[in-house]
Image (spheres, coloured by chain):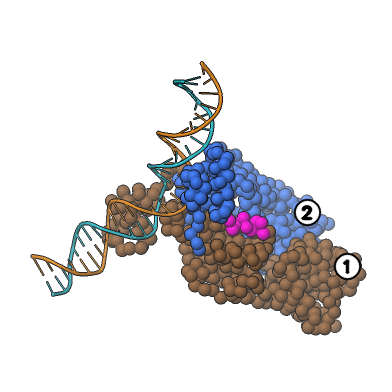
Chain colours: A brown, B blue, C cyan, D orange
Amino acid sequence: MAKATTIQDIAKLAGVSKSTVSRVMNKTTAVHPEKAAAVIRAAEQLGFAPNQFARSLASGRSMTVGVITQNLGSPFYDAIAQGVIAGLQGTGYSPIFADGRWDHVVEEDSIRSLQGRRADGILLIGGQLRGTDLKALCGTLPRVTIARHLPSVQHCCIYVDNVQGGFLATQHLIRHGHTKIAFIGGPHHHSDAKDRLAGYRKALTQANIRFTTKLVLEGNFSSASGHAAVHTLLKSGEEFTAIFAANDATAYGARLALDQHGLRVPQDVSLVGYDNQAESAFMIPPLTTMHQPAHQMGQAAAAAVLEKIQGQPIKSRVFIPELRCRESVATRT
Amino acid sequence: MAKATTIQDIAKLAGVSKSTVSRVMNKTTAVHPEKAAAVIRAAEQLGFAPNQFARSLASGRSMTVGVITQNLGSPFYDAIAQGVIAGLQGTGYSPIFADGRWDHVVEEDSIRSLQGRRADGILLIGGQLRGTDLKALCGTLPRVTIARHLPSVQHCCIYVDNVQGGFLATQHLIRHGHTKIAFIGGPHHHSDAKDRLAGYRKALTQANIRFTTKLVLEGNFSSASGHAAVHTLLKSGEEFTAIFAANDATAYGARLALDQHGLRVPQDVSLVGYDNQAESAFMIPPLTTMHQPAHQMGQAAAAAVLEKIQGQPIKSRVFIPELRCRESVATRT
DNA sequence: AATAGATCTGAAAACGGTTTCAATCGCTTT
DNA sequence: AAAGCGATTGAAACCGTTTTCAGATCTATT
């Protein structure tokens, strides 16, 4: 490509010094209107796009915030990312995304790389990093904000209460008269999955329903795992009248398996999902599920990093998922 | 944060010059093993992360490729993005994403910003920019690669053949004995939507089936629009035995509307989607749809930019979507 | 033993901006 | 008319690397 135009070229064309050009571009100091106009004209004429690298190097600010998210491509984390993008819109800061893939090694690499890119702030969404590691990081790193529940880092956590979500979903089923409720969870080491399971147990306990491991199946948040789980559940012979799936994708798989076994939803088996994925409203029947304010959360997180970058202390904030009642739950008579 | 450690700090600690440190870090020139070891030790001890800005500024290479995609959050474009990420993995280049949102103003802004970030290459996926604008861009910009069909820019196009896709889907329906096939499309100005419609017409013509506008509905690629389209279609009284929806999301909406009107799929109405979204395999019944090799395409596109950055000419490449037969199409007897 | 390469190495010049500092200018104030 | 002030301005330093260039040290040849 042709050599990019620099501040210097503009200075020459407009007949001023490069300092003045810089001032016009950043509006840091008043310059004579006439000269300013000349500079702007020159800039337009030459199609000037300031070199961000030089800019950041000189100013020490990168105007970027690094976002480490998990499972890019999954509805929940994508929605958060959208929220972050929206929250950063118009603030002059741009996000740089990195996928932690729920792997603390990948995560550490990403942080390294973000560090190299001199992100002004870092947003950690979910992930496997242990509290102690995080503490260490918080010391050396710019300004970290965490979208995840972490007891050891009380301040600066923004998260959605997964145990409450699991509780609410299960309670909804119980209120419709169900007592034999199966739970198809996520990987057992996954914090979201663990929390939702905890919520499920809490609801059972509160309603004096005996908890049995025979009704909890391990999935991996995929439709295929939901499908498989229903097969093994059915084969086990354990009775159940409802299923709470740890996410909507799992619920889809479960629903298909049920259909293949001639079981109707909701007449024979009630089904509740988690995530309120866009497709859920159009399932047959439309799926009752827990809505997570992911977009809102992303925006809140973005706002929080921004505050933190400006040196303000930020407050923790927890979001509560809401039940979206549709047609996949029937009353057990 | 504490001032980041620089190459200079390491030089001092290791007792060498910063040039040497740079050489060790980049392996550009052999240095005495002993000194190299000292440098590495020092770097580790100080937790050194090279400042990418300084690096890029000095070298003139940013080691990034800007990718302008459309509709972040939609399955197809997300899958492409994943492919691009995969294709860039391990090459030393990182992607910077910007969402063009199918709006040429946004698109131009994004290109501007990417220009400022001195992306070494630019990948344009879809979008509204006109051929002439693109030509202009190709002149001034680094190395642009286009994932989209553009007759005016013959070289360097990577795309999937949407008219062939539309043709194949419609043909599948025709082969199953359907002649009254409704088409629920996308916005009429959307190139993908237009192409799929063209494919639909082509299949009809080839089979000597009269084309009628009464059977083509305009949607916007959302489930809600598919839902609405089926309502208006049914109200119109126009007969039909099959629906080809321009994407899977639309098909989901259509399928629910059909169900609400007591129409069974596929016994009463056959349904074909487009995209092979992950959820489609788990619909009731599993949805027959056109699979687009989005991930592969993303990888191919990434490979292409890389080649282009290295100054090699790249060849255009067109991908053909494949039919994924599932259970939403029945033979019309 | 002298010389030509071949290896290493450090000094210094970019890279393209921002920012500090001091100087100039035109007015207003005494 | 001299002094003081605020508004503008340019020169120069600096940000942390890479990269060129030339010098220095070794090794191998004659």
Q: Is residue B229 left or right of residue A35?
A: right
* Quarter location, residue A242: bottom right
Count of marks, rendered view: 2
Q: Is residue A299 above or below residue B169?
A: below
Chain ID, mark 1: A
Give the quadrant of the C terminus of chain B. bottom right
Task: Compare residues A32 and B262 and report the one nearer the observer.
Answer: A32
Q: Secondary structure at mark 2?
A: loop
Residue A273 position in % (x across, y down)? 74, 71
Measure the C-alpha gap from mark 1 to mark 2: 28 Å
Q: Which residues are magenta?
A: A104-113
Mark linked to residue B325: 2
Q: Amino acid at mark 1?
A: Leu
Q: Is residue A177 left or right of residue C16?
A: right
CB atoms of marks 1 and 2 within 8 Å? no
- Judge whether residue A110 is colored magenta: yes
Chain ID, mark 2: B
Q: Secondary structure at mark 1?
A: helix
Residue A14 position in % (x across, y down)? 30, 52
Report the residue that reaches farthest toward the right.
Answer: A237
Q: Amino acid at mark 2?
A: Cys
- Judge whether residue B13 is colored magenta: no
Q: Is residue A246 above or below residue A44?
A: below
Q: Is residue A188 visible?
A: yes
Task: Compare residues C22 and A209 and report the one nearer the observer.
Answer: C22
Helix, strand or loop: magenta stretch = helix
Mark linked to residue A234: 1
